[in-house]
Structures are given as structure tokens and as C-alpha cells.
Image: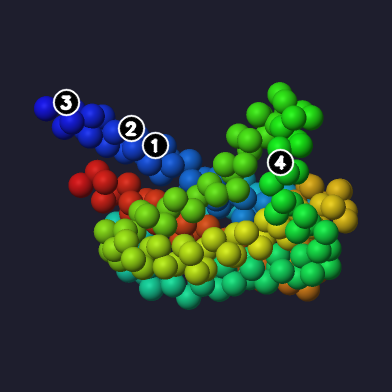
Amino acid sequence: ARTTSMLVIMWLIGGSFFYGEVVITPAISVMSAIEGLEIVAPQLDTWIVPLSIIVLTLLFMIQKHGTAMVGKLFAPIMLTWFLILAGLGLRSIIANPEVLHALNPMWAVHFFLEYKTVSFIALGAVVLSITGVEALYADMGHFGKFPIRLAWFTVVLPSLTLNYFGQGALLLKNPEAIKNPFFLLAPDWALIPLLIIAALATVIAAQAVISGGFSLTR
């Protein structure tokens, strides 16, 4: 009985965290993509919130018609998205390979010893580097454990790692890029296509957690 109670409590805690993710992910992910307008066309930055609302409204409006429409686009768009992440990051790493020194764990140890309070707060920000990727398991019921793990270790994790190291390399070279290091990784001619694919990818991520929330509720 005690084991059952503990399992139920753990399930409730995990479910609560996931519902929290379902609530905030669509808004945060879509807005983060559309914020690229600040780089592509600074004069349109006042449209970021209205456009985000429009995209999210349309996304929720199509829910009653089923998810097949969006579902057909999942694989090709997300694969393209992660390959772009990897490519942009690799391009920046090649230009500034000194960022690879961050692979040495002694730098983390030194950081914690030198800046005790700041390092503790910064550790909380580290979680942001993987936030959203937990939406992968939202579709575990559709695909099973093996495809999810395969996608994580062969595509998602390498792409995210390369992209974040690429952003770090960019910031080492140009600290002013902190305003939006992701979009500033891309050359000028690629900004608009990147904004479009980012918006599509975030819509798919939002759909994944919405579907996951619906499945959990059922």
C-alpha cells in the first residue's frame, strides 16, 4: 500500500509539472521564435506579441479538426530544424574554436569556487539549455521508447550541443550579440528563412505538448 501511495504521489507530481509545461510552452516557444523580428526587421518589433497571439489562436482553433494536419509536418520540419541548429552552431565553432575549452570541467569547478553565489544562480539558468526538449516524451505513446531515445541521442542532443557551443563562440567574439545570440548566428541572407522555420518548429513543439496534455488528461 505504501509503495502504491508513493507511486501515485510521484505520478501526480510528474503530471503537475507536465501540465505546467503545457501551459507555458506554447506561448514562450512561439514568442521566442517571433522575437527574431527584432533582428530581421527592428521596425516590426511592436508586432511580436500580436503575431504570437494570432499564431497561437490559429493553432488552438484547428484542434477541433484533429492534429493530422500538423502531424504530417512533424518529421520533416523538425529534422530540418535540428540540422539547421547543428549547422549554425558548427559554423560558429569553426570560426571560434576556443569555445571548446568549455569541455574541460575544471572551468566549471573554478567558476563555482570563484563566484559562489552567482554560480549557484547561474546553475538554474543552465536548465534553460534543455527546456522544451522534454516535449519529446509527450509522443512516447505514439512511437515507443526506442524511437524517442534514438532521436534524442542521434539528432536532438548533438544538434543542441553544437548550437549552444556555437552561441558561446559567438559571444566570445562579439559580447554585444547577447541580445539575441541564436538569430545572430545566422548570416544576414538566412535570417528570414530561419525566422520562418523557427516559427514552424515552435508551433510543432506547442502541438506536441498540447497533444501530450490531452493524452494525459484522458
Q: Inspect the image, locate mark 2, and give the three-letter code of the amino acid beneath it.
A: Ile
Q: CA distance from mark 2 to mark 3?
A: 16 Å
Q: Secondary structure at mark 1?
A: helix
Residue under the image location 59 percent in, 43 percent down: 128
**Mark number for residue 108?**
4
Ranked by sequence position, the earlier of labels 2 and 3 is 3
Q: CA distance from mark 3 to mark 4?
A: 41 Å
Q: Secondary structure at mark 3?
A: helix
User: What is the crowding at mark 3: few (fewer than 14 residues within 10 Å), some, or many (at least 20)?
Assistant: few
Marks 3,1: beta carbons within 8 A:
no
Q: Secondary structure at mark 4?
A: helix
Ranked by sequence position, the earlier of labels 3 and 1 is 3
Front residue of 85/103: it is 103
Residue under label 3? 2
Q: Which percent across, then down, holds residue 80?
A: 55, 73
Q: Inspect the image, locate mark 4, and give the three-letter code of the amino acid beneath it.
A: Ala
Q: CA distance from mark 1 to mark 2?
A: 6 Å
